[in-house]
Image (spheres, rainbow, N blue to C red):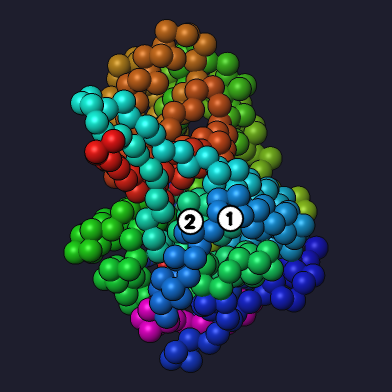
């Protein structure tokens, strides 16, 4: 099975600024590697602050014309982009799997998921309605219009190289904003290919610009956008510390912000749950992308009465998970993104064992014969709240099971985290559904369901998981101002 795209032009290694593919001002580059074997795929531009500024110059120059382009026309361009993404699904999936490591079937699924946001926001572009307000006093006409905020800077993580960037670019363009973006240093190729397809769709020059940067150069590139007054919005997905840094640093120019940050999702199995459904839900939610998702169940709480039965069924299902490179058709879990990620996962497992947990499945070591970035799925019982995996996002295929005795107790522990992105629970008691859904401090609550992501729903968190929503009609508002018009002398 090959992971090389059939169309050469989908492997881009340069920046795209003002409608031109260009080298960086400093002439530097950095390596993009395959996480399955650390082999070099290609070198891409290592941008500097000068490249970041050039991108904003282009986006800023393109903004007035794009803002004034009729919504229907913007929508048509987005629809053309959507059609090209679908037409190139296989090539994009290969790029995703090559640079990020997920099995090819998941790569294909991610392309469709990314495309669904482009289609959704093409449809929403023509529905950015305002309001007419009945005036409380006579002789006035009071109305509200929505306007695009201006130039948007998008910074994205590596775990979903197509979806994370599509769900920022599509609503921004639909709203009438122009965009500068910087994909994660581990996975820039998919984003570059998406921009290539946007060019092919006929987006006007300067409307969408992309620069790539190594981990070392990223602070200078993003720092340039933070201090540039012309950038009116930062939309970021990534870790909580970097999100907080962006919030602090954008204060001087008071930009609008959307921050989709880390999570520490609880997954609660009550005594009255359908256990088979709960096991399937956990498998779907936990092992997508090898556990490297921000909404991945990180802490699994199982009621005493069903603990042993649940663990036995879960162990049976997990024992069938095949680990291997994305080129292996039967691989269900690919490599982790890099050695740092592997080190954190193994540290969490070891820490849990040191504090008295039991390893039912898995290992405290990697899977060296496959390569240094592979780990076995791990099932841990006897997890307690003093363990690192109770507080930090493990971001890997590790399931720690905690026991609980009462609803009040488990809700309290589930909420005892600074994060609040996703929460899951399984029960057949309708009163409990309402009570627990209301009590969980989380931007998303999944009830008797393990896979909830949809372009039609608002995705985002509360507390240290950030603010702002992606997808749905709420997703468009993030890229618009609300302007109040008060007209007198009628
Ligand atoms: P990260 O914060 O290290 O990197 C994210 C992006 O920020 C990358 O493009 C990176 O280059 C950039 N960045 C890094 N340091 C920066 C700095 N000093 N200034 C400006 N930009 C900087 O996160 P990651 O390791 O790539 O991604 C994993 C994290 O993302 C996890 O915590 C995960 O939960 C989170 N995530 C959240 C969501 C969500 O929707 N809430 C989705 C996916 C991932």
Q: Residues within 10 Å of mark 1 (few under 14, many from 20)?
A: many
Q: Which residues lie in the magenta part? A: 38-53
| Residue 47 magenta | yes
Quadrant of residue 49 in the image? bottom left
In which quadrant is the C terminus drawn?
Answer: top left
User: Is 254 situated above or below 205?
Assistant: above
Q: Position of residue 235 (x, y in %)?
A: 39, 56
Name the residue nearer the viewer: 158 or 400: 158
In which quadrant is the N terminus drawn?
Answer: bottom right
Q: Position of residue 465 (x, y in %)?
A: 34, 44
Q: Residue at x 68, y 64 (%)?
A: 201
Counting residues from the start of the chain, the first of labels 1 and 2 encountered is 1
| Residue 284 magenta | no
Kindly identify which numbered label has been placed on residue 74. Answer: 1
Q: Residues within 10 Å of mark 2 (few under 14, many from 20)?
A: many
Q: Position of residue 253 (x, y in %)?
A: 23, 63
User: Is 23 situated above or below 295?
Assistant: below
Location of ligand 1 given as a quarter of the image = bottom left
Disc 2 target residue: 176
């Amino acid at each position: 099975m090959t992971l090389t795209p059939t169309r050469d032009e989908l492997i881009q290694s340069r920046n795209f600024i003002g409608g031109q593919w260009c080298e960086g001002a400093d002439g530097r580059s950095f390596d993009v590697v395959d996480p399955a074997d650390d082999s070099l795929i290609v070198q891409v531009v290592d941008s500097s602050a000068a490249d970041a500024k050039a991108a904003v110059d282009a986006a800023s120059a393109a903004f007035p014309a794009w803002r004034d382009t009729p919504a229907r026309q913007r929508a048509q361009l987005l629809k053309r982009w959507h059609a090209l993404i679908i037409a190139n699904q296989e090539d994009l999936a290969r790029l995703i799997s090559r640079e990020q490591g997920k099995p090819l079937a998941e790569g294909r699924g991610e392309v469709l998921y990314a495309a669904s946001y482009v289609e959704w926001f093409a449809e929403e572009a023509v529905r950015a309605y305002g309001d007419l307000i009945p005036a409380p006093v006579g002789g006035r006409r009071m109305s509200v219009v929505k306007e695009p905020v201006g130039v948007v800077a998008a910074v994205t993580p590596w775990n979903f190289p197509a979806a994370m960037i599509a769900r920022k670019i599509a609503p921004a363009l639909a709203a009438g904003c122009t965009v500068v973006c910087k994909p994660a240093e581990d996975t820039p190729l998919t984003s570059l290919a998406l921009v290539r397809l946007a060019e092919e769709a006929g987006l006007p020059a300067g409307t969408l610009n992309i620069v790539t940067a190594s981990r070392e150069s990223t602070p200078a590139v993003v720092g340039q956008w933070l201090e540039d007054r012309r950038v009116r919005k930062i939309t970021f997905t990534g870790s909580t510390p970097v999100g907080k840094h962006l919030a602090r640093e954008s204060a001087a120019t008071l930009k609008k912000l959307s921050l989709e940050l880390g999570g520490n999702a609880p997954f609660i199995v009550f005594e009255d749950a359908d256990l088979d459904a709960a096991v399937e839900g956990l498998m779907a939610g936990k092992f997508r992308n090898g556990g490297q998702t921000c909404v991945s169940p990180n802490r699994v709480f199982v009621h005493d009465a069903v603990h042993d039965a649940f663990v036995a069924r879960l162990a049976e299902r997990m024992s069938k998970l095949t680990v291997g490179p994305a080129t292996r058709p039967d691989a269900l879990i690919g490599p982790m993104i890099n050695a740092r990620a592997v080190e954190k996962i193994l540290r969490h497992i070891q820490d849990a064992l040191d504090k008295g947990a039991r390893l039912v499945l898995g290992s405290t070591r990697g899977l060296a014969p496959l390569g240094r970035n592979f780990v076995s799925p791990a099932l841990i019982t006897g997890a307690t709240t003093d363990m690192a995996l109770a507080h930090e996002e493990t971001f890997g295929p590790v399931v720690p099971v905690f026991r609980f005795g009462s609803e009040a107790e488990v809700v309290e522990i589930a909420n005892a985290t600074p994060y609040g992105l996703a929460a899951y629970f399984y029960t057949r008691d309708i009163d409990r559904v309402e009570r627990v859904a209301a009590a969980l401090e989380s931007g998303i609550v999944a009830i008797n369901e393990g896979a909830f992501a949809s372009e039609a729903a608002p995705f985002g968190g509360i507390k240290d998981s950030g603010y702002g929503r992606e997808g749905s009609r709420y997703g468009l508002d993030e890229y618009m101002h609300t302007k109040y018009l008060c007209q007198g002398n009628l």
